[in-house]
Amino acid sequence: AEEAVALRAQAEAVRRLKQDKADPDEIAKEVAKLLEMKAQLGGDEGKPKFVLKTPKGTRDYGPKQMAIRERVFNAIISCFKRHGAEVIDTPVFELKETLTGKYGEDSKLIYDLKDQGGELLSLRYDLTVPFARYLAMNKITNIKRYHIAKVYRRDNPAMTRGRYREFYQCDFDIAGQFDPMIPDAECLKIVHEILSDLQLGDFVVKVNDRRILDGMFAVCGVPDSKFRTICSSVDKLDKVPWEEVRSEMVGEKGLSPEAADRIGEYVQLHGGLDLIEQLLQDPKLSQNKLAKEGLGDMKLLFEYLTLFGITGKSSFDLSLARGLDYYTGVIFEAVLLQQENEHVEELVGMGSVAGGGRYDGLVGMFDPKGRKVPCVGVSIGIERIFSILEQRLEASEEKIRTTETQVLVASAQKKLLEERLRLISELWDAGIKAEMLYKKNPKLLNQLQYCEDTGIPLVAIVGEQELKDGVVKLRIVATREEVNIRRESLVEEIRTRTSQ
Amino acid sequence: AEEAVALRAQAEAVRRLKQDKADPDEIAKEVAKLLEMKAQLGGDEGKPKFVLKTPKGTRDYGPKQMAIRERVFNAIISCFKRHGAEVIDTPVFELKETLTGKYGEDSKLIYDLKDQGGELLSLRYDLTVPFARYLAMNKITNIKRYHIAKVYRRDNPAMTRGRYREFYQCDFDIAGQFDPMIPDAECLKIVHEILSDLQLGDFVVKVNDRRILDGMFAVCGVPDSKFRTICSSVDKLDKVPWEEVRSEMVGEKGLSPEAADRIGEYVQLHGGLDLIEQLLQDPKLSQNKLAKEGLGDMKLLFEYLTLFGITGKSSFDLSLARGLDYYTGVIFEAVLLQQENEHVEELVGMGSVAGGGRYDGLVGMFDPKGRKVPCVGVSIGIERIFSILEQRLEASEEKIRTTETQVLVASAQKKLLEERLRLISELWDAGIKAEMLYKKNPKLLNQLQYCEDTGIPLVAIVGEQELKDGVVKLRIVATREEVNIRRESLVEEIRTRTSQ
């Protein structure tokens, strides 16, 4: 775009010089400059000019990024499978009305499709609403499933910090009517397992309950009609200090200063079973039905977390609110803690890397008869995790392989293309991962260099003498050792040498 | 929608009865019926009425479908990896202009996003154009990559035959300047490997070359300006007989009957190296530079296919044209052959299950300086394959597991929830795939039934006596055998018993 502006300016300059009947030499010079600029802009051959980019807030994954992504996915998927989850998939878009009224203020971030005749569609905003739609549509009242897929938000991207408009969510949810807090505790166990497995450094999982929040608002004197908006103010406490949140509550949202101050006292509290016990004795909170219910369940939850051995990294935190409208009970969010000996920038504004909670009313919004299916789930924020691992890998200079090729089929002399094709075909048919250079007569040096560059550990070299002797020369790239292997033993030899 | 029509009809009936001052009892009866219909339509509690469905031409994948899908993906991915491919991913949408001018008549099938301010976007129509954009944008001149992702076409869906508006493509492409036909032959080898591996029954891969087609059109007297449109008529030969195609050429497209008849003679030809040799001697074709080039390369290709041992299922077929504009050389398409002893309907209209070809000009369309990167690739049509396997599985009554759970943690008596939680946590931490029922006091029978239903092979039963003795009772579901295992040996025992 900058070049286009410069081009227009230059065209204007030429026009003026001509208009002013300037020195013909000067005009010629400026015209030449103009033509050169045009050529650089790719205007040759009358080709249409493309802006060569991906849409705002999106990116390609090259082979190296994919290799890291697969590692992270594998860790997450094996955890989900360890917990007995099935897997489902849903379309990338839903009927627009399916998403309507589920996301509160965030609805403005939904991508709509153009009306091209037919149904009005929107890209999914998360995987939770499609999951609820799937349950209601198929009348499923009991399932434990995971779903890993891209979701879409027309948000302000901050790509270096892992905030994209197209990004993956990795969701695990348990739907069904069960005894309290058992599935909820499993969701928290899953967060612990995944974050530990990925070795992202120290973390804490903040836990709260929408019922405790609502009860707290009630006893602090927040009018019912202001619960949601005050809740979204509280939600900002992980980013801005209490004083700012308080002035938003009082100034913008018209809450009384006394109510705000009472909230201020509660939201600074965080702890474990002790704090829960203390609040169960709190003269005001204990009088509120919702808060009491929430605190009772929170106590049960922390007892289960104790059995799972994960209370050390779990914190009952009254400032945790979570933005989305559909939560009805336990909510939680995992945040990475600053590492002392790491670069500070790396984690600033990283926000949460996992979050979730209980949403007992969402499926009922889709069911024609309003039948409810209680659900609790967790969503892993893969892009942020991925950003951290990508930066770490770049800093470490670790070389990452992007293929799994076991052997390069090579030749030492010319005119052996047919023999290479014959051999590589044998290897493929035996299940060996093999490559060859797509040249009739490649130089041996280039073939060996290709192995060095791509990390292929073995080279199977065919030569005239080897063909006569019924052998293949197998070269081990790392040690430069070469051994003749009988053709019929080659597959077995490659398997042995490349099995970990 | 049907219910809505019935509802309106009933309301109209009530209105008429009232207008006609009919018997009050009859009116009351019909009103009651109307109210019941309204209630069934979910109008109670003033809830908004949802159409509970996925968008037209799309579907959810439940756990069973996902299990089949994963099997197919695994076969395809391991083949791509066997051939040394890296993997990339691109966004689901592209700038609208990136897709403009790439798909000829099919462009009308592209899904556009709504203009919500900012860039104009479209959902990707295939993976080939995004790949070309990726290469040009990153100045990559040499890569072998696969990409498995969903693409979007506003086509007329025929879902039972595996035709969707959202569907997966599994693409493998080789980009770079290489010696002729070596990468092209590898793409055909890949098609053979995948279709053989998936055991879909007999198949044939039709092969042709755009240059042979263009040369053929020229020597048959088709004017240059009609090449593309006549080519798209030829493309219909797999669905309609020659006579219909001929009358389209002559009637709709204004080709002379003589030219059409000359084309008719060529497009009926198919065979192998013999046919190629014969056409290389053809007095007309051999005089055409393009056709000669194409036939020369086709000969080379079939020599390589001979070395790969796959000429048996390869057919040089002059009627193969392929719809897309961007092909410049070899084109191919794999079709399943009718099985005699199978249900006929199953394969009717199944069309091709894989296709591809060479597109040497596409990357140059994106490069600002028009630099070309020759490419050849193959796309596997997973949805059709998936439809076949799904139907086959349904017919076979084979029971397919949708989880990998190794063991259910159960209890024989009440009040052992805490012990179950403790044990399952130990198992998860040791990497064992374990589940438990989310009930405080589940009946043993229900726990065993759950294993039967979901295929879990082992049950680890905690009871008071076992706790005292420091053992867990391990039950083998298939044989009902029960053995006491010392707690510290349990993980190892489960591993041994569930390793294949």
Image (cartoon, coloured by chain):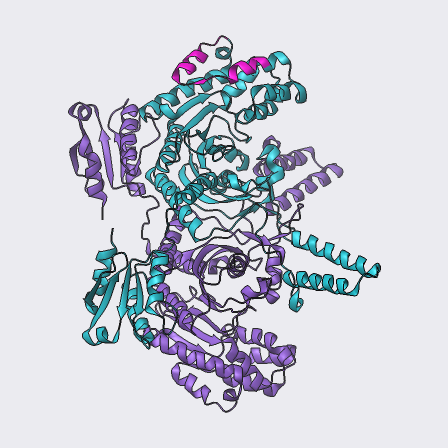
Chain colours: A purple, B cyan
Q: Nearer the viewer, residue B21 or B362?
A: B21
Q: Nearer the viewer, residue A361 or A220?
A: A361
Q: Is residue A479 above or below residue A139?
A: above
Q: Is residue B470 above or below residue B391?
A: below
Please tell me in which quadrant of the rendered image residue A276 appears.
Answer: bottom left
Please tell me in which quadrant of the rendered image residue A153 appears.
Answer: bottom right
Left/right placement of residue B173 relative to residue B126 reads left
For the point 29% across and 57% down, which residue is it?
B457
Give residue B207's position: percent from left, percent from top. Answer: 45, 25
Residue B264 in magenta stretch: yes
Q: Which residues are magenta?
A: B261-283
Give residue A466's position: percent from left, percent from top. Answer: 18, 26
Q: Is residue A137 above or below residue A477?
A: below
For the point 49% across and 31% down, which residue is it?
B359
Give residue B91's position: percent from left, percent from top. Answer: 51, 48
Q: Is residue A6 above or below residue B186?
A: below
Count of marks placed on residues: 0
Left/right placement of residue B268 relative to residue B397 reads right
Q: Nearer the viewer, residue B130 or B415?
A: B415
Give residue B133's position: percent from left, percent from top. Answer: 51, 40
